[in-house]
Amino acid sequence: MTATQNTAFSDRMAKVKARIAAACARSGRSPEEITLVAVSKTWPLADLESATAAGATDLGENYVQEAVDKITHWQGPAPVWHFIGPLQSNKTRQVAELFDWVHSVDRLKIARRLSEQRPPAKGPLSICIQVNISDDPAKAGVAPADVAGLLADMAGLKNLTVAGLMAIPAVDLTESTLRQQYGELKTLRDTLITTYPDCKALSMGMSGDFELAIECGATHVRVGSALFGQRSYPTEH
Ligand SMILES: *Cc1c(COP(=O)(O)O)cnc(C)c1O
């Protein structure tokens, strides 16, 4: 990455952070409550290093093989690595070994494997249960009504912590529907946290809606293109 591109990342990061701060101010929250996960899928390692040099503390990746290549070649202080993409059971081992967070767990089988394959020395893996808040057949995630049961089943898994809930809403929702669905996820989290005090995170909001998500209670926003630019080149996964 050239110096100009580096500056561009820093500029975009500053703008995103200012927008996060403004959304927090509007909703009476503190920016310290929000973790900005810089979604670096498709971008080369050099761009990720520029991102962390510019202050990105948390990076999000979607594709196991691409992420493994980046993480195993990483030099210097490691960021917090978040796996946010669909996860098949034959790929859980590398994710359990290399990541700090997995946002996209929606089956007990995947959670079991992650717990079994997590090296205990690394400490528990933080996971979010992905919830299909829009009841969209095209989207992954468990139905809101099934989350409590799944969490109860996962509670005994010793090498992972169910740290919160994650959602990817349907596209093209009106703003009021989106607010309502994010609000329902927050209500669900607020109920669960009374029994499961670790279940704190609300991973919701991307480049197009992170301010709205923060107003609705997000603790983790997953922002790609607003930080790195448009993902313009095709990938094969
Ligand atoms: C790609 C992706 C993002 C980031 O999307 P942008 O619109 O580029 O911010 C966030 N969350 C998930 C699950 C993604 O796959």
Image (tube, rainbow, N blue to C red):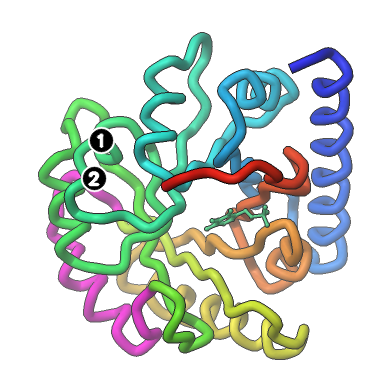
Around disc 1, counting alpha carbons within 10 Å, would you say few (fewer than 14), some (14 to 19), or many (20 or more)? Answer: some
Q: Nearer the viewer, residue 99 or 173?
A: 173
Looking at the image, which residue is at 25% across and 55% down? 88
Q: How many callouts does the rendering have?
A: 2
Q: Residue furthest top?
A: 76
Q: CA distance from mark 2 to mark 1?
A: 6 Å
Residue 123 screen position, x and y as percent: 26, 34
Please name the amino acid that badge 2 sits on. Lys
Looking at the image, which residue is at 43% across and 15% down? 73
Looking at the image, which residue is at 23% across and 68% down? 107
According to the picture, the residue beneath numbered tag 2 turns out to be 91
Please name the amino acid that badge 1 sits on. Gln
Check contact, mark 2 vs mark 1: CB within 8 A.
yes
Q: Nearer the viewer, residue 102 or 73?
A: 73
Tag 1, which secondary structure? helix
Work out whether residue 41 can be spotted. Answer: yes
Residue 61 screen position, x and y as percent: 49, 42
From the viewer's perspective, tell me whether residue 167 is left or right of residue 83.
Answer: right
Around disc 2, counting alpha carbons within 10 Å, would you say few (fewer than 14), some (14 to 19), or many (20 or more)? Answer: some
Residue 89 screen position, x and y as percent: 19, 54
Position above or below: 132 against 201:
below
Work out whether residue 198 can be spotted. Answer: no
Ligand 1 shown in quarter: bottom right
Looking at the image, which residue is at 46% across and 42% down? 82
Residue 228 screen position, x and y as percent: 73, 38
The image quarter in which residue 13 lies: top right
From the viewer's perspective, tell me whether residue 27 is left or right of residue 128.
Answer: right
Give the position of the N terminus as an image quadrant: top right
According to the picture, the residue beneath numbered tag 1 turns out to be 94
- Residue 53 is a magenta residue: no
> Where are the magenta residues, as a range?
141-161
